[in-house]
Image (tube, helix red, strand yellow):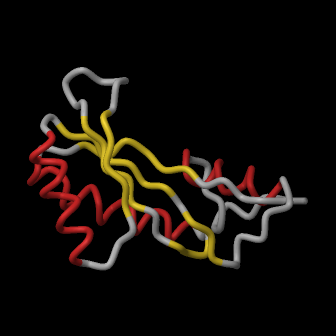
């Protein structure tokens, strides 16, 4: 199988999506994707989470022990087809809004059942 660099650019997102595709995942169907943002205080994390909830997002809130300066995590769980454009757009949306709450985007993950 040849890699189409317009669909799977050579960066972290493109590489992860290409790996899922190579494992046989159907990227065209909707999957639940986890996008995490970390925060310096519980209050700031909850305010950001409240904004996501007002926009109909499923999310979780938990302590985050991997970063002492940003010890709180909000994870959003949108359902989307796994295209490069969808992942980049949702990540950009979070990165645009989280700094107002002291947040920092911490990555995304998708477990695709085979």
Residue at the image position 78 percent from the left and 58 percent from the top: 3
Decide: is 96 above or below 15.
below
Q: Position of residue 52 (x, y in %)?
A: 25, 68
Foreground of the two, 32 or 17: 32
Residue at the image position 79 percent from the left and 63 percent from the top: 25
Q: Residue 21's quadrant in the figure?
A: bottom right
Count of numbered tags: 0
Q: Position of residue 67 (x, y in %)?
A: 30, 24
Q: Position of residue 92 (x, y in %)?
A: 33, 62
Residue at the image position 25 percent from the left and 43 percent from the top: 104
Foreground of the two, 85 or 37: 37
Decide: is 41 above or below 11.
above
Tell me: 50 left or right of 89: left
Q: Position of residue 34 (x, y in %)?
A: 49, 55
Foreground of the two, 32 or 86: 32
Please state, as top left, top right, bottom left or bottom right, where the C terminus lies in the image: bottom right
């Amino acid at each position: 199988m040849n890699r189409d660099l317009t669909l799977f650019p050579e960066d972290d997102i493109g590489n992860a999506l290409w790996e899922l595709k190579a494992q046989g995942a159907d990227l065209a169907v909707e999957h639940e994707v986890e996008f995490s943002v970390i925060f310096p205080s519980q209050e700031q994390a909850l305010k950001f989470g409240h904004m996501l909830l007002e926009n109909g997002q499923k999310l979780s809130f938990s302590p985050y022990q991997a970063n002492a300066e940003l010890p709180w995590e909000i994870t959003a769980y949108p359902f989307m087809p796994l295209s490069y454009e969808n992942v980049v757009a949702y990540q950009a949306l979070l990165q645009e809004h989280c700094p107002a709450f002291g947040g920092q985007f911490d990555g995304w993950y998708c477990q695709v059942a085979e």
